Image: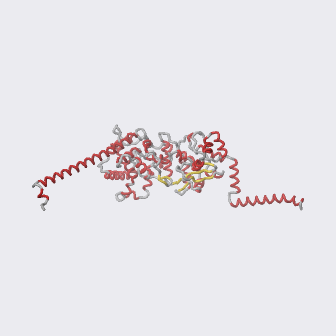
Amino acid sequence: MESTSQLLPEGKGKELMTEADEVKLEIAEDTNKVEMEHQFREQESIYEYARSIVERAKGKCALYRVHSGLRDGSAKHYEPVIVSIGPYHHGKTPFQDMEEHKEHYLRELLRRVKENNAERYVEALKNEKREPQALHCYVDIFKMDVDSFGRCMVLDGFFMIEFFRGKWAHDKKNNMLFNRRWLKPLLKRDMLLFENQIPLFVLRALFALTEERPDTDRDFVKLALGLFSFNGERIPHDEIEIDRLDDIPHLLGLVYKALVVRKRKSFEPETLKQQNRRWKSLFEYLINKWSPFEKIMKDLDPGTPKRPYNRRRKSWEPIWTAVALKQVGVKFQRAKHCKAFYDITFSNGVMRIPRLEIYDSTESFFRNLVAYEQHSKQYIPQQVADYLQVMDCLINTSKDVELLRHYRIIDNRIGNDEKVSTMFNRLCSGVSFVREMFLYTQMFDEVNKFCNNPWNKRMTKLNNEYFGSPWALISFMAAALLLLLTALQTVYSPLSYYHP
């Protein structure tokens, strides 16, 4: 059998094989070109998406320093301990070591995305005037030139994003810094300081530029909030409206939005929800809806819980401390199944308060949330400040903390009730309240009405004096029995005289 080479004309086999190779090579080159063009279009799409985030942020972001009224006597709660984010604390000596770690993570990210430098990211954050758009977000004065500011945004932004992604967990061989157990809590604390922020649109844009697909806002929110916890639970991200992210100025604002601003239905106390499920019949529905019967129903069922917030009242009086309220008959219960830590309700002499865990970082966290409320350019109800005002009224001494701890309302993780009472007594120092917008006015009115009711005072005094302990109860029953026997003897003595 003749070989294949013998069947082909002499010298033609080599030429034909070469032509076939050239065809394959051309096909491969065309495929590579298509893939490169597709990859280029994807990169351009992602770049344009990041640019659109920056463009939409114009005039919507303002970052301040904490004003002196809040800072006086409590400056340490607003200043970073280990890392500076943004320009306000940039360049200070205590944070120089962390700058080297920021550069290390930037180099690792550039290596991962196959970039030689970060210029493309710096350019993406500039406006039409060739200035970093974030430069116009910082209201207070800081010392930094424009180029250094742009590099600061990229360096700090990517450090936070890589920290969100957990890249430090896979880099322990090259970076022993994160092997220290105490470091991660301090980093998370510093990232939630009011004046230690960079604009959220910077983080979103940088995150999008290093992801495979352009629409990554939901992933970013989930990743960022998943790092933080409150009251022993991860901060929820499901209720964050992605189309409203442009209105959130920074990471602290994102955490505030997740914790505080919720749908109205979550404000209703559990007892009201349970009652609403029972009002199903048409007759009861009409009675509840028709105004002529509203007062009748209230008179028949005075214990019906009401919504705890009433913004129409312009004046209110503070309530008593927890110990004083207990002495006049107010009962305390730990509220269950509450989505919001500030959902405090009062009905039928019972005050229900959600559980609150107290850590060393709790004061700093609350102070910076309040600072965000105080400096907000747009109207935001001062939910955190009003909640702290309620707790300040309830807690005056360690005895009040001990009482609330007894009912498992306060979970004291710092081990000292005196420190907790001192914390709540000074958290509202320097805070500006809008008195007519206080969110707990109606609840305060109901508590004060209960405390000033003479009947409640008498019943509480009777209970404390005669039923406060088993021995007091036994003494009261013995006295009552003796009084009863004496009365019977008085009645039967005349009867025995007339009827021997």
Q: Outermost residue toward the left?
A: 10
| Quadrant in the picture for the N terminus | bottom left
Relative side of 261 to 483, left or right: left
Please tell me which residue is depicted at 47% across the width and 53% down the height of the picture. Answer: 234
Please tell me which residue is depicted at 68% across the width and 46% down the height of the picture. Answer: 453
Q: How is this picture coloured?
A: secondary structure
Tally the marks. Answer: 0
Q: Outermost residue toward the top?
A: 129
Of residues 349 and 133, the one nearer the viewer is 349
Relative side of 12 to 230, left or right: left
Of residues 157 and 308, the one nearer the viewer is 308
Q: Position of residue 56 (x, y in %)?
A: 39, 40
- Evaluate whether residue 48 shows in this view: yes
Relative side of 133 to 386, left or right: left
Task: Look at the picture and state if 339 lies above or below 433.
Answer: below
Q: Position of residue 229 (x, y in %)?
A: 47, 53
Task: Look at the picture and state if 408 lies above or below 33.
Answer: below
| Quadrant in the picture for the C terminus | bottom right
Relative side of 4 to 452, left or right: left
Q: Position of residue 343 (x, y in %)?
A: 55, 48
Q: Position of residue 245 (x, y in %)?
A: 43, 44
Please tell me which residue is depicted at 49% across the width and 52% down the height of the picture. Answer: 230
Of residues 25 and 156, the one nearer the viewer is 25
- Evaluate whether residue 393 shows in this view: no
